[in-house]
Amino acid sequence: MTPQRKSLEALSFQAALWLLAALCFVLLVLPTVVVITVSFTSGFSLKFPPPGYSLRWYSALLDAWQLHFAATNSLKVAAWTTALSVAFGVAAALAIARSETWKARLLDSLFMSPLVLPALAFGLAALMFFSVLGLPVSPVTLVIGHVVVCVPYVVRTTVAALAQLNPALLESSASLGASRLHTLRRITLPLIAPGILAGAFIAFMSSFDNVPVSLFLRDARTDMLPIRMWQDLEGKLDVTIAAVSGVMIAFTIAALVIMERVAGLSRRLR
Amino acid sequence: MAATPRHDTTTYDLKLALPLAVFFLAFFLAPLAILLFVSLHTDSSMTAMGITQYVKFLGDPFSLSVLVRTLWVGVEVTALCLLLGLPMAWVYVRAPGWVQSILMLVVLLPLLTSVVVRTFAWIVILGRQGIVNSTLATLGLIDTPLRLLYTEGGMIVALAQVQMPLMVLPLVTALSRLDPNLLDASAALGAGSWRTFGKVVLPLTLPGIIAGCLLTYAASITAFITQTLVGGGQLLFMPMYIYQQSSTLNNWPFAAAISIIFLCAVLAVVSLFNALGRLSSGYAHS
């Protein structure tokens, strides 16, 4: 190849790569920017660009009691789900990490399977299961269903954190006379805490955002925020939803930045 | 696990996994077994057993077309995510530290933002008065707004954005493990950029590509919210089909049978990807 053709060839490669990466960047950023812009509109429609800017839809949020009620329910369910997922998930991760036995591998696959199976099919299955048992759907059945689909995140990040733990630390703790429980409390748990925290955060977010399981397992009194928003959007295109979205995006960005600092979130998701 | 020596401090007893294992047995495996049991009933009052629901689904061209369309949409979304996500991951790995922080925020934000919020954004973008139509109208390219919402094309772009992080994150891991000396060696031996990419980069990152494709595919065919809100009522996919049959029509055996068929289809695709993943990691490390 002549140098000129070669540079042309390299140039075409770089151009294609950067063009596609730029397109990907726009695709990822555009929705967030559009939602935040529209949420400050002074008009009554989702027209973009908005005819003018105001805070009216945010102040309308203050009176939207249905959304408040749904958001409170979602927060409660997410908090219970996260607490139970951490308790079950960390114990299970301690047992199956660093173990190569077939039992441990089998349990690992079992605990991860809700991540790839369609959650809607599981939601329907759980509804049938509870109705066969004669249990009416309630906030309790809702939390149980959420734990099944959220606990895999805690197991995954905790197993990954345990895999990076230097076994020499545990061995030296033991050789210095510390009991297993003492080593667990003073060495293992503090070192894997960021991994647990990252998993708990993702479990919380995914429970707060869950629709497919909530759709079947909530009762009439337990209105959940994503379902309320989804039903509002199917009926009419309400600008209040844009303001709710703006608030949720702001919280997500803040939580994301904090979690990145405290738990190194991005390293744990890969 | 009795075989674990008591003095081994680096592993823990398998009994610690017992609470979660029992929980999964009771609230994950048992419900799936009930689902299978319900699907084996011939009528919605569940008096007689039989495989008529499966026969009904597999003999019905409409139901089959819903299944095929759902699986095909997954392929289209995954292909689009790979096409855009791979260059993004490539740029990320080569960018300076502060650019990496910004890019990681941009990639992670959609992953953690509520799916309803992300989908709502696409309704605003693709709507009649949305950003695409108003831009085209300002440029004088169109007189009447294009119908973008409730079309398959619009839905695929929206799904690709929603699932993009699941593709980019494994690709970033795979690309950052790539030895840069290999690229220099390939260039020194006379290969151009495209050839190096095709012959060195792609084969070595194949395990990451397959991992990303698996996650993106599984997430996009089950993305109920985005499918119903951006796809609209005319485009029916498997998750909505299950919901319609169970909640609106109360036909539990048929809804259960659709769910089992969907579960099996997803399991088949997952096994296929896993088999490919094992093959490719053997290839990449040989």
Image (cartoon, coloured by chain):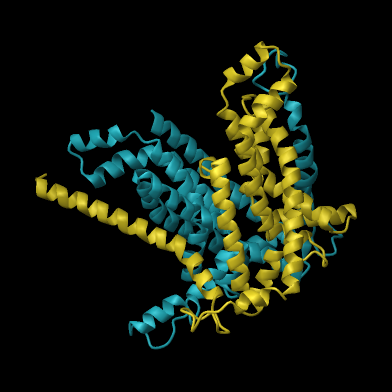
Tint of chain B: cyan
Instruction: Give coordinates of residue B140: x percent, y percent.
Output: 33, 85
Among the 4 quarters of the image, the one containing residue B114: bottom right
- Image-based side of A195 in relation to B86, left or right: right
- Which quadrant of the rendered structure holds the N terminus of chain A? top left
| Residue A152 visible to an observer of this rendering | yes
State the residue at coordinates (69%, 49%). Answer: A149
In the figure, B256 relative to A180: above or below? below
- Image-based side of A1 in relation to B117, left or right: left
Instruction: Give coordinates of residue B93: x percent, y percent.
Output: 37, 44
- Image-based side of B71 in relation to B56, left or right: left
State the residue at coordinates (60%, 38%). Answer: A194
Nearest the camera: B142 or A184? A184
Tint of chain A: yellow
State the residue at coordinates (65%, 35%). Answer: A108
Extreme-bottom residue of the structure? B143
Tag count: 0
Among the 4 quarters of the image, the one containing residue B184: top left
Instruction: Give coordinates of residue A223: x percent, y percent.
Output: 77, 66
| Residue B236 visible to an observer of this rendering | no
In the figure, B67 relative to A182: above or below? below
Nearest the camera: B202 or B55? B202
In the figure, A38 relative to A79: above or below? below
In the figure, B80 relative to A166: above or below? below
Instruction: Give coordinates of residue B232: x percent, y percent.
Output: 58, 74
Extreme-right residue of the structure? A134
